[in-house]
Structure formats: C-alpha cells, structure tokens
Image (cartoon, helix red, strand yellow):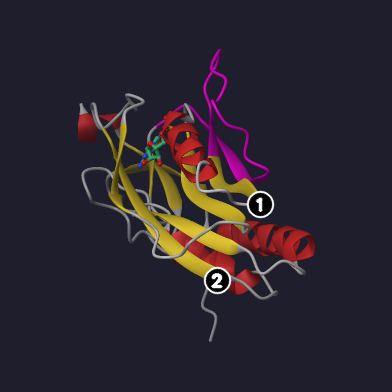
Amino acid sequence: MDHDEGRVPSHEDIECVLLSQADIKGIVKRMGEELAEDYRESNPLFIAILRGAVVFFADLIRAVHCPMQIDFMAVSSYGSAAKSSGVVRILKDLDTPIEGRDIVIVEDILDTGITLNYLIKNLESRGPRSIEIAAFLVKDVPGQRSAVLPRYVGAHVPDAFVVGYGLDYDERYRNLPYLGVLKPEVYS
Ligand code: 5GP
C-alpha cells in the first residue's frame, strides 16, 4: 500500500529536499514514456553508469515499456571527489558487444559532462548505431556548458552538492529515497 511519501523525514545532514519521492516518480514515468516512444522498434541497450545511476536506472527501465536489454559500466574520474579531471578509467566494462546497437547511457547527474564525453568517445569506437544520454539530473552552473547534451533529462538542479536517490557523498546517502542538498558543513 502507498503511504504518505511526503512524510519521510529528511536526514539531519540535508539542507533541503529538492525532489520528493512523488516528484521523482513523475519524472521517471515521463522519461519512461519518452524513451519507449523513441525505442519501441529497436531493442536498445540501456547502460547504467555505476554506482550513482543504479537507483534511477532500476526505476527507469521498469517505466520503459518496450523490449530492451541492460548492461553496466563503472568508471572512475581521477582528481578530487568534487570535480572531474577529464581523465577517466574504466573499472568495469560492458559484457555486451554494442556494434550496430542503439545505446542509451543512463547517468545520475551531468555537471561538466567531461566523464560522459570520454565514455561516449570510447563507446563510439565500438561501432554502435546510435548513442543517447538519459540523465536524471543536469546541474545548471552559471557560465558552464556541458561537454555533452543529454537527449532525455529528468530535472535541472542548481549549482549545489546534491545527494540521495543513488547519489553519494563519500559513499553515504545513496539510500535516501529523495534528492536533497547536502549541508555544506558536512563536506567542508
Ligand atoms: P561531470 O563529469 O559531468 O563533471 O561529473 C559527473 C559526475 O560527478 C556524476 O556522475 C557524479 O558522480 C559527480 N557529481 C557531480 N555533481 C554532483 C553532485 O552534486 N552530487 C553528487 N553526489 N555527485 C556529483
């Protein structure tokens, strides 16, 4: 039975809730419908980028009502936890050949887009038919243009550090069922 989702108490380290469980449900449903419409004929391969995207991915694929397959990749970006350096290491590669396939990369949050830009170049060299990005969040940073343009976007968030719904700080908070802004004193 559905309980009142608005009543989930926010964690003490969260400054404010940006997206409630109900907001997220609506976003996932809308994106699922868009993707099913575009991919209903082509048996796409949905790729989750571990680990941040897994919660969104698990919900999203169940909202895409067309034949599809899934696979996983893990990458690590060298540099500090807060900013991408542009040098990306593949920690876990796909198990599926992607030549001739339609690919949907599912990402948790796009900030500079540097990580995904690298990944797309790598995947393009394997000869897929198409590659598109479904990003749960796009961070709006004044003066910054992302290196890649996602075709499917869940929501735009302000330039703050967000956690929950799969997104972590130092491997914590991934299990929060909503998306919130982390209090700056937690990471400063
Ligand atoms: P980009 O390469 O687009 O600059 O960085 C994207 C990656 O940085 C995301 O996949 C995520 O791991 C991390 N990231 C960027 N902004 C945030 C944020 O506000 N919160 C969390 N938890 N991770 C973020």
x and y percent of residue 129 in the render?
66, 52
Q: Nearer the viewer, residue 57 or 94?
A: 94
Residue pointed to by mark 1:
129
Q: Nearer the viewer, residue 10 or 105?
A: 105
Q: Amino acid at mark 2?
A: Gln
Which residue is at the far top?
Answer: 143
Q: Nearer the viewer, residue 117 or 164?
A: 117
Q: Amino acid at mark 1?
A: Arg
Residue pointed to by mark 2:
69
**Dot 1: within a 10 Å radius of its alpha carbon, few (fewer than 14), some, or many (20 or more) residues?**
few
Residue under the point 54% across and 42% down:
124
Which quarter of the figure is the C terminus placed in? top left
Nearest to the eye among marks 1 and 2: give it.
Answer: 1
Label 2 SS:
strand
Q: Which residues are magenta?
A: 138-160
x and y percent of residue 72 in the render?
40, 60
Q: Using residue 50 as the reference point, say whether residue 24 is left or right of it.
A: right
Label 1 SS:
loop
Say whether marks 1 and 2 touch (CB < 8 Å).
no
Residue under the point 55% across and 61% down:
46
**Which label belongs to residue 165?**
none
**Dot 2: within a 10 Å radius of its alpha carbon, few (fewer than 14), some, or many (20 or more) residues?**
few
Q: Using residue 169 as the reference point, say whether residue 130 is left or right of it.
A: right
Q: Using residue 128 as the reference point, say whether residue 48 is left or right of it.
A: left
Indicate whether 51 appears above or below 40.
Answer: above
Q: Indicate which disc, 1 or 2, sits on the residue closer to the N terminus.
A: 2
Among the 4 quarters of the image, the one containing residue 41? bottom right
Residue under the point 50% across and 48% down:
126
x and y percent of residue 90 in the render?
31, 45
x and y percent of residue 135 in the render?
56, 46
